[in-house]
Image (cartoon, rainbow, N blue to C red):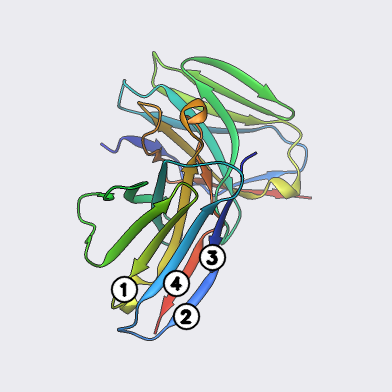
Amino acid sequence: QKEVEQDPGPLSVPEGAIVSLNCTYSNSAFQYFMWYRQYSRKGPELLMYTYSSGNKEDGRFTAQVDKSSKYISLFIRDSQPSDSATYLCAMRAQAGTALIFGKGTTLSVSS
Amino acid sequence: GAVVSQHPSWVICKSGTSVKIECRSLDFQATTMFWYRQFPKQSLMLMATSNEGSKATYEQGVEKDKFLINHASLTLSTLTVTSAHPEDSSFYICSASPGLAGTNIQYFGAGTRLSVL
């Protein structure tokens, strides 16, 4: 079993839809959780950062962490064509160490 | 957010030559930088952790003599792919974390696409 599992998709939705992206993990020591967005042939861009369990909201984006289930989610409300990208979940156990990434989910939002 | 600059963005080279990729943190000091490799439609795979003033720590399976890492200052780390071959063609991405106060967040460079002919 891989440390971080993420459905690669692709996921196609119409403009305005609510998008749900998820990752599961096996290492109970993970406590720092991030979501990155990556456009084709570009470096990842940090979207959301969450420490331990709980929710965090930033504009149209909401990140949720359920450590008891080892499950994290990213919700995108009112999705836009510009949201079309690959979304990577990432996590780490200790500050300052390298991130462990999921495979990424490719999202396509059609207008 | 913090800015990490990576150069060049794209390089084409002949088989057998060496290629150097630079990673700079523009507005913060980074005691630690990370180098990743990404194949098409795959996730980022950590290659090595670069520590300022000391030797890099390589992940299992990564040849340290082939992928030379130098972290000469708190704002610059370089990755040199020595004697590159077509199988080294990939997307290389660096990341850096600000100092002690912000070590939880990694900022990524834009990546370098290496094509070895």
Mark 2 surroundings within 10 Å by alpha-carbon count, few (fewer than 14), some (14 through 19), many (20 or more): few
For the point 31% across and 20% down, the residue is: A28
Separation of marks 1 and 3 at Cα, in angstroms: 21 Å
Separation of marks 2 and 3 at Cα, in angstroms: 13 Å
Task: Say which mark, if any, is on residue B114.
Answer: 4
For marks 2 and 3 on the same chain, the one whose residue lies earlier in the sequence: 3
Camera-nearest label, 2 or 3: 3
Mark 2 sits on what residue? B12
For the point 47% across and 62% down, the residue is: B22
Picture layout, residue A2 above or below residue B92: above
For marks 4 and 3 on the same chain, the one whose residue lies earlier in the sequence: 3
Secondary element type, mark 1: helix
Separation of marks 4 and 3 at Cα, in angstroms: 11 Å
The quadrant where residue A2 appears? top left
For the point 35% across and 77% down, the residue is: B18
For marks 4 and 2 on the same chain, the one whose residue lies earlier in the sequence: 2
Which amino acid is tagged 2? Ile
Mark 1 sits on what residue? B87
Which amino acid is tagged 1? Glu
Mark 1 chain: B
Q: Is residue B45 left or right of residue B9?
A: left
Mark 3 sits on what residue? B7
Separation of marks 4 and 2 at Cα, in angstroms: 6 Å
Q: In the image, are marks 4 and 1 on the same chain? A: yes
For the point 30% across and 26% down, the residue is: A27
Mark 2 chain: B
For marks 1 and 2 on the same chain, the one whose residue lies earlier in the sequence: 2
* For the residues bearing labels 4 and 2, Cβ distance under 8 angstroms: no
Mark 4 surroundings within 10 Å by alpha-carbon count, few (fewer than 14), some (14 through 19), many (20 or more): many
Which amino acid is tagged 3? His
Mark 3 surroundings within 10 Å by alpha-carbon count, few (fewer than 14), some (14 through 19), many (20 or more): some
